[in-house]
Image (cartoon, rainbow, N blue to C red):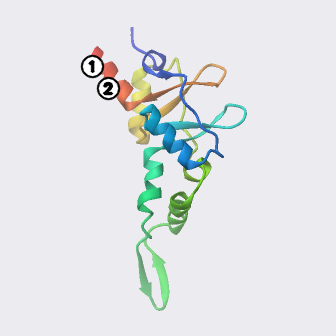
Amino acid sequence: MSKTVADVMSANPVTVKPETPLKEAIKLLVENRISGLPVVDDTGEVIGVISESDLMWQETGPEPPPFIMFLDSVIYLQNPARYDKELHKAFGQTVKEAMSDRAVTVFADLPLSQAARLMHEKKIRRLPVLNSDEQLIGMITQGDIIRSMAES
């Protein structure tokens, strides 16, 4: 019988709210030795994820998009809106300002192989796990999947 997400996920994840100060989110990541936190609204709905990579902008700051000057005009070689978003993350003070929104979620009964495929295709490292009532019940990470493979 193939494993499901529920078989390998971490139950009862630590969560944060959008208005949580970034310093508090960073402290939770370190204290719990985790690399990401689901962000939930007042109803408990998952609205995003804040991860170590989101927080790296706080230290490094974004790089301006490459551009060329042509006849006294600036022509951006990448979308400047992306830079604006990265700049906002770098100087944000709350989880909402730094998190990755539009969280990809999975249901607990999803076969583990499908969750792994989704993570690979979307290039994401963690997924909030929902029950049939669409309430957050866990998190599954690439590490959870690798540990499961080692146990098989």
Label 1 secondary element = helix
Residue 2 appears left or right of 128: left
Looking at the image, do the residues carrying marks 1 and 2 touch, with CB atoms under 8 Å apart? yes
Q: CA distance from mark 1 to mark 2?
A: 6 Å
Q: Position of residue 115 (x, y in %)?
A: 44, 27
Q: Quadrant of residue 62?
A: bottom left
Residue at 44% x, 45% y is 52
- Within 10 Å of disc 1 (Cα), the crowding (few <14, some 14-19, many 20+) is few
In the rendered image, the vertical position of residue 25 relative to residue 33, given as above or below = below
Q: Residue type at mark 1?
A: Ala
Q: Position of residue 68 (x, y in %)?
A: 41, 81
Q: Position of residue 129 (x, y in %)?
A: 54, 26
Residue at 35% x, 29% y is 143
Label 2 secondary element = helix
| Residue under label 1 | 150
- Quadrant (top left, top right, bottom left, bottom right) of the C terminus: top left
| Residue under label 2 | 146
Q: Is residue 68 visible?
A: yes
Q: Residue type at mark 2?
A: Ile
